[in-house]
Image (tube, rainbow, N blue to C red):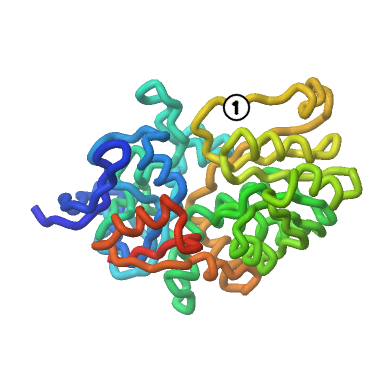
Amino acid sequence: MPKMKAAIFVEPGRIVLDEKPIPEIGPLDALLRITTTTICGTDIHILKGEYPVARGLTIGHEPVGIIEKLGSAVTGYREGQRVIAGAITPSGHSYACLCGCASQDGPGTRHGFKAAGGWKFGNTIDGAQADYVRVPDAMVNLSPVPDHLTDEQVLMCPDIMSTGFAGAESGGVRIGDTVVVFALGPIGLCAVAGAKLMGASTIIGVDTVPERLAVAKALGADHVVDFKQGDPVEQIMALTDGRGVDVSIEALGTQGTFESALRVLRPGGTLSSLGVYSSDLTIPLDAFSAGLGDNRIVTSLCPGGKERMRRLMSVVASGRADLTPLVTHRFKLEDIEDAYDLFSHQRDGVLKVAITP
């Protein structure tokens, strides 16, 4: 049986490069030869054992590649075509899809843990940090890449661009809103770009890494707050003349950032949560106005499917959002263990790494 290289979860603390059989495909699937992929913060949660997956699973959920083989029932595509697939791969016909929540088209609860909806790559099926990946429900999930766009230009679309933009969309950002984004990692930076596109007139980014603060300003942040220079809540309230923000986007997944995001809301404001949390959250009574503040707390799982991918690539093609500065490091698949070491320890100003087989 033909073999391929793949990044495999062995146990908490160990993701290693090893050989696996090239995936077989069913009638509705496609086999994608990966040309570029990347490592996500969620993969680090898997590496640390904070998000449970099966041992032996291939990790990764951000594929850019070329169709190697099509299932017998797949129409509308051709072998050799350059495509992306979203990190979330809905079937298109589940109850979740048909009620308008395709991101939650998933397996429900497994191993006592509520699995994250339609996120299958590197979660419930083998993922994209490999030479090849099987894309389920290909006609729902494959989106052709325009010839004039490079792999790195569209690399953010499958996950962090879709997720970051969803933070602004789910938060209901309106023209003239004031928005704050807590944590300017790749998803937070995409949330800044999304809030700008949605019409926010004032965007505040919160972090402490100078390079991230600079990228946030380049993507549309009007103010940046260094949380090491003082209480970020006090700094944000000062910037808003005590009014607070209309929408607060939490993009890290910690109690501290969640609580701060809640405390800076104006009455009736929305907390849009994107972070992946690894422990229980507590909602402070005062910040929640004892439940009487008319506030909303919403969560988002990266929207997927080919139409979402098409729209995101249209944004990239139009020049309205240039996310290529987020790719700060490049590795061959053979060196992915080194890439994990760099990315997990956040060394050398890393934002995103491009992995090429």
Q: Position of residue 114 (x, y in %)?
A: 45, 27
Residue furthest left in the image: 1
- Residue at image coords 54%, 47%: 303
Q: 326 or 121, which lies in front?
A: 326
Left or right: where 338 falls relative to 108: left
Q: Residues within 10 Å of mark 1 (few under 14, many from 20)?
A: few
User: Does 146 appear above or below 249?
Assistant: below
User: Mark 1: which amino acid?
Assistant: Leu
> In the rendering, at what x and y percent does residue 169 appear?
68, 48
Residue 174 showing in the rendered view: yes
Q: Which image quadrant is residue 284 in?
A: top right
Quadrant occupied by the C terminus: bottom left
Residue receiving disc 1: 281
Query: Could you tell me which residue is drawn at 63 percent across and 54 percent down?
Result: 208
Q: Quadrant of residue 248?
A: top right
- Whether 257 is drawn above or below 340: the answer is above
User: Which residue is drawn at the image coordinates 38% and 68% (left, top)?
Assistant: 330
Residue 230 appears left or right of 107: right
Q: Quadrant of residue 85?
A: bottom left
